[in-house]
Image (cartoon, coloured by chain):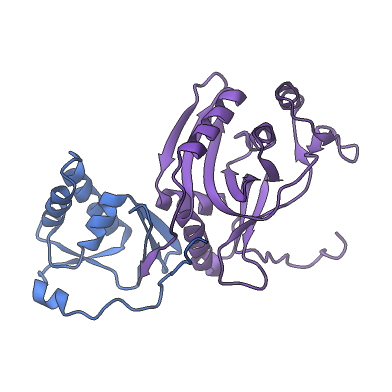
Chain colours: A blue, B purple
Amino acid sequence: MGAFPLQRADVETYLMPDGSCVLFDPRAGEGFTLNAAGALAWEYCDAALSTEEIAREVAALLPAEPQAYTDGLAVVAQLLEAGLLERRSDRVSAEVVESQPPPAEAGSLHLPREG
Amino acid sequence: VAALRGQRLRIAAPLLIHAGAVVRDGQALLLPGVSGAGKTTLTYALAVRGWQTLTDDLLALNTAPDDPGATLMALPCPRCGHVSARSLHLLAELGVSLEGTVAGLVEYHRPRAWGETAPVHYMIAPRYEAGAACVATPMTQAETAALLMKASFAQRRVEYPAQWRAAIQVAAQTRGWRLTYGQLVGALDTIERLVAECPKVAEVSVEGEK
């Protein structure tokens, strides 16, 4: 498709202890839930990979899940449709991605350990 | 009522949700659901398995006043609940004794004892279907957070971010299931099995970034 998905910068990502994930869209005031495979796909959306490449990476990481590739395609499509991902027409090189500053502290949620 | 007339009622709790809740051994179990899902009957029935009622329908989750950064806790809301004659009969068969009717209100009863404030560890979203087999389906913690939000009472949009973060915090320490059931005893047995098999949540941490 020639599109390189990129996470929208203001979307808050909350990775849960079981590997699932909540994305909070502050513009819409809505939350989106992802299972572990979806959370992996979201993590790969840095404009360095195409949708198909992301799905292949997810499938490679989850070899026991036969639907992982199609699930990866589907979740990226849904997140593009929901506007949580931007569609870049040009690929960002891996070197550029790695040189990006770490995520901002704003939006982070650190919970206390259980006593 | 007169004092509230003409005023905008402000809710102090970070989350106010439509749910029953019980507590045992210092761990709260939430039962969120719409009217007719079986919250009240199931909440009161769990007394026969040693759970104490926190609420049958309206649950506030909040931190301690002197420790606002701490874990959200399930607070008791001691009020009477609507129990149909059929549910009252089922509960009596189980050996659950309720107080009431209350204040002369037909079909309104309340437990004889109440539980105390506790952290949330389990969530069961019940759905009663006459004649249905008892089936429990696990939820991810992200789904658990979303269901908590769905069960929360609508507030102003400006409060959505704080509400979502509260729901995420609670879900991160919680194991959740959807439970379809047609018989009360089957539901109680299933809940007991799920809680018994559930590994204790040893650590609560959510990686969040923007």
In the figure, A77 relative to B91: above or below?
below
Q: Depth check: B74 or B19 in front?
A: B74
Viewer can see residue A38? yes
Q: How many marks?
A: 0
Residue B203 as seen in the image, left or right of residue A51: right
Identity of the residue drawn at 47% across and 46% down: B175
Q: Residue at 70%, 24% (x, y): give it.
A: B94
Q: Residue at x 75, y 40 (%)?
A: B81
User: In the rendered view, would you say A103 is above or below B51?
Assistant: below
Q: Position of residue B44 (x, y in %)?
A: 70, 36
Q: Nearer the viewer, residue A101 or B111?
A: B111
Q: Position of residue B53 (x, y in %)?
A: 70, 43
Q: Quadrant of the C terminus of chain B?
A: bottom left
Q: Residue furthest right?
A: B104
Q: Is residue B56 visible?
A: no
Instruction: Reply above or below: A107 against B103.
Output: below
Q: Is residue A95 left or right of residue A41?
A: left
**Residue A110 image-quadrant placement:** bottom left
The spot of residue B69 in percent (x, y) is: 56, 72
Q: Position of residue B192 (x, y in %)?
A: 54, 34
Which quadrant holds residue A64? top left
Decide if residue A57 is on the left or right side of residue B78. Answer: left
Q: Quadrant of the N terminus of chain B?
A: bottom right
Q: Residue furthest top?
A: B131
Name the foreground residue: B70 vs B156. Answer: B70
Q: Is residue B60 left or right of residue B208?
A: right
Who is closer to the viewer here, B140 or A48? B140
